[in-house]
Amino acid sequence: MSTEVIATGVTLKTAPSARRTKSHSRANRVRPKDELTGLKIVVTPKDTKEFNRLGIQLLQVIRNGNAKQALKLIGQNADVSFCDQAGWSAMHHAASNGFVELIIQLREKEALVDALDCSNETPLHKASRKGHAEAVIVLITFGADISAVNSNGETALEIAVKAGQTTVVETLCMLGVEVLLQDWSWSMVDDNELSKKQKKIIEILVRQHWRSSGYAQKSIQFEVFYLKARENKYLENLGVNFIGNDEAEDKETIENNGADDDGFFVFCGKMKSEYSDVTNNQHKDNTEIVSDIYECRLWCNERKTLRLNVRLKTVLASNENLIIMSTNEKIGRINCIDKFTDHKNPSKHYSAVHVTISVKKTSVVFYFGKLIEPEKFSIGSKAVTLKPKGEPEAEISIPKGSFESEGQMFLQIVDTKDVNEEEKEDESGDMLTTNIVNISMTDGQQPNQEIGIKIPIHHKLSEDDAVVILATSSDAPCSVDDWEVMEAEMDESGKSATFRIRHFSIYAGSSKEKVKTDLPGVVDAVERSINRQRKIEFIFLTKWVNADSQLLVIEGTAVRKSEGRIKYWARQGYNEKSLKRSKEFCVKNGQSFMFTLFGNLVEVSREESFTLTYQNNRDNFRLFNICLDDSNKPFTGEVQISLEKEVKQTIPFKKSGLFSCCSAQRVKKVTNIEQEILQTICYEVIKTKAAFCLPYAVTSLTAVLKMSKVTLGSLFLDEEELTEEDF
């Protein structure tokens, strides 16, 4: 068809466009040469007076970098669909110059964000080539296809990589782009020949490849959107609600800028902790992660803070606090926490956390930690009865003159509900009947008079049984012998137990019968509660994908929940005959495990090992697409489970004398761990260019080394169990 436009003697011929389908498949990236792929306008002279001056002027002023004049022309209803002889539209030129405001205005005039030029390039290709990351975000927010390819089969990512645009590469990876490049030859040269930009790009692409399974399994999710100044936005998949109508800050913004309709572009993502750069080493000793890792990025933003409501699958006990954490520490505050509990359906327990975060920086990464802090009391010479907030029904009665001098007393309550749930409940009741009370004085003082303590009974106790108290004076009890059993009195209602002490320690209530029949089990339950450990096991199941590969699921689950999880995976098509179960492990929340495949089984991505971080309030699993390493060998192999562990090792020196860093290689008859300690110390010394020398009289060296792979066990997958039945 042809269209006559009143312009400078030009006939505009518009070719019909074929509807494009979005695909992430590499096989579909290059289009046939004879395929009509989009809007292409051919300009031929006809009558100068009929030419649309505004349309051609719009292209010229954008190409010349005059964004203000372009905005005026758009306001005068210039035709935004005009293209030059190369097929570039106003959107192409705006993207190439990084004119974000102009892109927004063009979009409001219904300009195409995926318009194609004569090389089949979209505005996203242009912005990526020139390194305009903000323009990339705006285009993708407005619906630009991140996987679109030009006539050479290049995506926006490959163009950015070739142009060395590090920020754009990082932005596209943040938006979940696949790492599929046609030309990797540039990355195969010697490291010394690579530029800093190229090294950084390789680092980004490797990390994105490592995260690819996270996108596929929805362990990494995100949304990018435009939020108006007074608009709220709920992201159901992320469980995050953005509160845009912050009246106090809106008023300040209006006063400063004279407008109340300023919006901004937002990226919000969340991922499981094993896919993030946040490590357990960044946690405090008394803090554990209870959420996924969240990331917020804002563009075109005038705000200083942003309010969020985040839904977490956890409900805090009375002795616990929730804090917002980040690698940058001071990034926001928690305004309040609403708890929602459904005692009939534990899976519906959750908390709504109302947060205000600072958005002065482009990117904010944060997560939530559960903090168990001791309560602090000032103790003097007067008699006092203390009522801890973490256990409102408890009482500690301190008589007058119990201490020689004034001091500070710390009291910590440890919840025992989770440990009781791990044990099988029977008629004899729960393993522990009370929460644990840990009392100490900062100056080490002990009372010189008897102190009365009343602890509420929270858990089941048989009618004819009594409560006894387990106590220890050891800071780190490691055996049953470190604990003593004390008598306690129950009140008439049977809701609390009272006992008297002359020494501050750790105290926990249990049934007299259970202590008599299974004292080691009761002590183990107390120690697991104190260390915040849980009993878990790993289950492995497989299902066929095709004749050459299978899906393998590995899940770490509480022992009491494992049967239910096995049935869940069976409903997903996994073969229960392939089930393998590991032994039980006692682990802390946030413990990271490593899985490594051996034998004739390999993961399709050829990764050597995979990490899973265990968290109490979620399903902890990883999916692997496994195939044969050698097609001539059977479908058999081994999955090894390992973890990172600190090992304290002392290396004796038989001869005294100076020990320099270079002499580590000359030490004979040392274990592998000892040798690794020596090499680690020497490496740190060389790295910091410091002199390292031990005194002449030193006869031993003690160091703590983190072993990255302490093997816990292996599960074997054999050909008979992996037999293809229904394929």
Image (cartoon, rainbow, N blue to C red):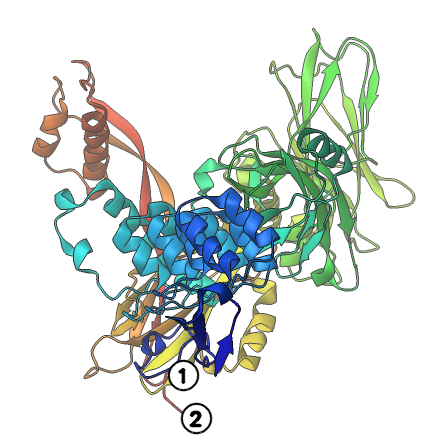
Q: Residue furthest bottom?
A: 726
Task: Name the spot of residue 622 as percent of width and height, x first.
Answer: 45, 64
Residue of label 1: 544
- Residue 616 visible within the image: no
Residue drawn at the location 77% of the way across and 46% of the way down: 338
Label 1 amino acid? Trp
Residue drawn at the location 51% of the way across and 62% of the way down: 52
**Which disc is residue 390 wearing?**
none
CA distance separating discs 2 and 1: 9 Å
Q: CB under 8 Å between callouts 2 and 1?
A: yes
* Image vertical order of residue 373 relative to residue 340, above or below: above
Residue drawn at the location 51% of the way across and 64% of the way down: 218
Task: Name the spot of residue 603 as percent of width and height, x first.
Answer: 32, 69
Question: Which comes sooner in the sequence, label 2 or label 1?
Answer: 1
Nearest the viewer among 613 and 28 is: 28
> In which quadrant is the C terminus drawn?
bottom left
Asked which secondary structure carries label 1, the reply is strand
**Which disc is residue 726 wearing?**
2
Horizontal relation, residue 109 to residue 122: left or right: right
Q: Quadrant of residue 106?
A: bottom right
Nearest the viewer among 248 and 527 is: 248
Task: Name the spot of residue 62 as percent of width and height, x first.
Answer: 44, 50
